[in-house]
Image: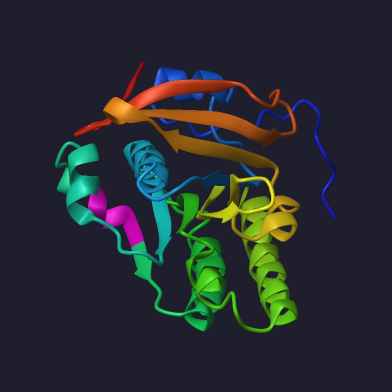
Amino acid sequence: MEKVKFNEIDNKTASGYSCIDNLMQGGLEPGIITEFYGEGGSGKSNMSMIYSYYVLKSGHSVLYVDTEGFSIERFKSIANNDVSLLDHMNIYRVKSLDDQYLALLKSDKLIGEKKDSKNSFGIMIVDSFTNFFRMEAGKDASARMEGYEKQMNILAGIALKYKIPVIITNQVYEDVNNNTLTPFGGFFIDHAMKAIYRIEKFGGGRRRITVEKHRSIPEGLYTNFRLVDTGLECD
């Protein structure tokens, strides 16, 4: 048990881009899971890389669980080809749902072992969290829900125990009942999130990020940006 200190200031993790940081009132909150969701190519992985770069520049390490294929070239572009930063960019490629579960358990151990070091982990990212769950959508639903819960509990524990932000990215499917794009996992993932942002893509390379759920920021607020070679540009 740990007593809550009302005068303790939680340091948020910024992106380095004013439009994003202003929307999030300073950046990602430590101690919680933040979800970015959107259709393919909307910018979820780019956002994950941008936060990774900012954390690395601050002198901390990044733990990145990759389920879809991390683009080293894209990250180097965002990082202005500063390859020295890659020394503390810990990327783990997982190949199945079981592999993902084991990776989260290992991540907890790795972050704990390094928590008092100079280059302690400043963020954990799972990109995308639902990729392998989606592949098993036709199988036992109750087992899938149990899998969500087990993995979410690990991530929530990591965020809270080490006081770092955890990002998950999520894919979408078309809800035929209301003709909208809905994040995969529905209530089971939504319930575990303290912050959810929707990323949309429009013509001309424009993107929009909107607050879908947050405990201190009004829902519906948004900002527009464009993806560029070095990261993004605020519109």
Residue 7 quadrant = top right
Q: Is residue 187 left or right of residue 232?
A: right
206 inside magenta stretch:
no
Q: Residue 229 location, x and y as percent?
A: 19, 34
- Name the foreground residue: 63 vs 131: 131
Q: How is the image coloured?
A: rainbow
- Name the foreground residue: 87 vs 22: 22
Q: Looking at the image, can residue 14 be seen?
A: yes
Tell me if residue 48 comes above or below residue 89 in the rendering. above
**Residue in view at x 85 percent, y 55 percent:** 1
**Residue in view at x 52 percent, y 46 percent:** 37
Q: Is residue 163 left or right of residue 7?
A: left
Q: Looking at the image, can residue 165 be seen?
A: no
Q: Residue 126 location, x and y as percent?
A: 48, 59
Q: Residue 52 location, x and y as percent?
A: 38, 45
Tell me if residue 86 comes above or below residue 104 in the rendering. above
**Residue in view at x 73 percent, y 27 percent:** 216
87 inside magenta stretch:
yes
- Name the foreground residue: 223 vs 201: 201
Q: Residue 38 location, x and y as percent?
A: 49, 45
Q: How many marks?
A: 0
Which quadrant does the C terminus fall into? top left
Q: Is residue 42 left or right of residue 193?
A: left
Residue 9 quadrant = top right
What secondary structure is the magenta-colored segment mainly?
helix
- Name the foreground residue: 27 vs 38: 38
| Region in magenta | 85-90
